[in-house]
Amino acid sequence: MRSVLGMAGLLIVLLTGYLIYSSQVRHVTDDKPVVQPINYAAVRSDLLSLGQAERLFWAANGSYATLEQLRQSAIMGSLPGGSRSGYEYSIEVDGSAHFRITATPTDPARTDLPTLWIDETMQISQ
């Protein structure tokens, strides 16, 4: 009998906690759908992978590559193409001197997202 009352009490406490939690979540989001967060780790990883591909292309060809040239080369492998993780990638090259890979947010409604970039120093900046 004591264990049945204990289980009933536990269920009541859990139900009360759930109702309070769900009402608070609804209040915070104003019944709007929750926006899926951007996976910054994936974006940073993409930038580093593209930067490494640029270095490999430079070692093989003596100049840096555009995104299209990387796509056509065997170096590209499974690197991101045009967009992924809520970001679009573009590459600016200056022959064999410099490259800059930019990750630009694709959702115009998300003005809080930073534009990230990497260059030949392999340092990610925003």
Image (cartoon, grey):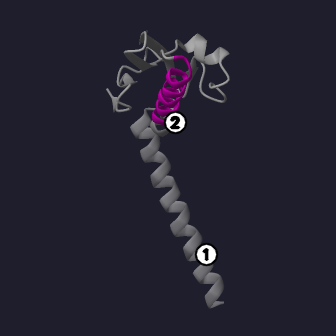
- Residue type pointed to by label 1: Ala
Mark number, residue 42? 2
| Residue 34 appears in the picture as rendered | no
Along the viewing direction, whichever of 107 and 51 lies nearer the viewer: 51
Q: Residues within 10 Å of mark 1 (few under 14, many from 20)?
A: few
Q: Position of residue 93 (x, y in %)?
A: 43, 11
- Residue type pointed to by label 2: Ala
Rendered view: 52 above or below 99: below
Query: Which contiguous range is marked in magenta?
Result: 42-61
Quadrant the N terminus occupies: bottom right
Precedes in sequence: disc 1 or disc 2: 1
Residue 53 sits inside the magenta stretch? yes
Q: Residue at 44% of width from left, 14% of height from top? A: 108
Total numbered circles: 2
Rendered view: 122 above or below 103: below
The single residue placed furthest to the bottom in the displayed view is 2
The residue beneath circle 1 is: 8
Q: Residue at 45% of width from left, 34% of height from top? A: 44
